[in-house]
Image (cartoon, rainbow, N blue to C red):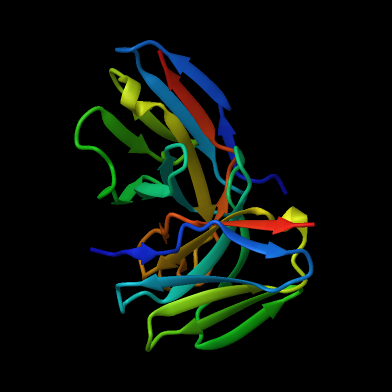
Amino acid sequence: NAGVMQNPRHLVRRRGQEARLRCSPMKGHSHVYWYRQLPEEGLKFMVYLQKENIIDESGMPKERFSAEFPKEGPSILRIQQVVRGDSAAYFCASSPPGTGGGLFTEAFFGQGTRLTVV
Amino acid sequence: QKEVEQNSGPLSVPEGAIASLNCTYSDRGSQSFFWYRQYSGKSPELIMFIYSNGDKEDGRFTAQLNKASQYVSLLIRDSQPSDSATYLCAVRQAGTALIFGKGTTLSVSS
């Protein structure tokens, strides 16, 4: 059973370009979470999605950032017009459905995408 | 605002000792609690989770939860140099994502 798959592992973008980060959850998992981590800092929640639904996007910047988790295919985190401050590691996690929206289930992380904006 | 607090450390312990990592949380509605380990440059790995008051043991690891005090801890027995990493505490409410603390850096010296 493959784990959470993220690609690309490393992504370099020039200022003003778009970045697309992909996350395929573990088999049977219907909840996806995106986090951002700056060097020497903790994981900052960005967005929580289920298939075709955004459950909580309270951690997502209002502009330039968007996320989706379509019925088919991976979840996508999209950053438009990237700036140097967007350089960070972006992690995706997934968890299975369960009681209370998966409250008592584990969430597993992918290997992350390290975005560098030059 | 939901907050999860951890002492950033570093926490230094000699090999074979017990390492004690602590975490407090602000939201009494939090219902499940997770400990992750993260090596430098790597992704977080789940160690264990707990949702009932008391202790939960898994090998050398014991998670302790006290909801009245809004406190969760992780004990690592017989610490090894390979345990040197950052330990992340996370909490969750129904229908929400995991909210993480900033992590405690553990250093185990041989």
Q: From what the image shows, is residue B68 above or below residue B78?
A: below
* Nearer to us in this view, A107 or A42: A42
* Residue at 74% across, 57% down: B109
Image position of B21 (left or right of A54): right
Q: Position of residue A2 (x, y in %)?
A: 70, 44
Q: From what the image shows, is residue A20 above or below residue B33?
A: above
Q: Can residue A45 be seen at all in this image of the molecule?
A: yes
Position of the N terminus of chain B by quadrant? bottom left
Q: Position of residue A47 (x, y in %)?
A: 34, 46
Q: From what the image shows, is residue B103 above or below residue B5?
A: above
Position of the C terminus of chain B by quadrant? bottom right
* Residue at 20% across, 31% down: A63
Image position of B70 (left or right of B22): left
Asked which quadrant contains residue A29, the reply is bottom right
* Residue at 43% across, 64% down: B6
Q: Position of residue A71 (x, y in %)?
A: 44, 41
Residue lying farthest left?
Answer: A62
Image position of A88 (left or right of B80): left
Asked which quadrant contains residue B28, the reply is bottom left
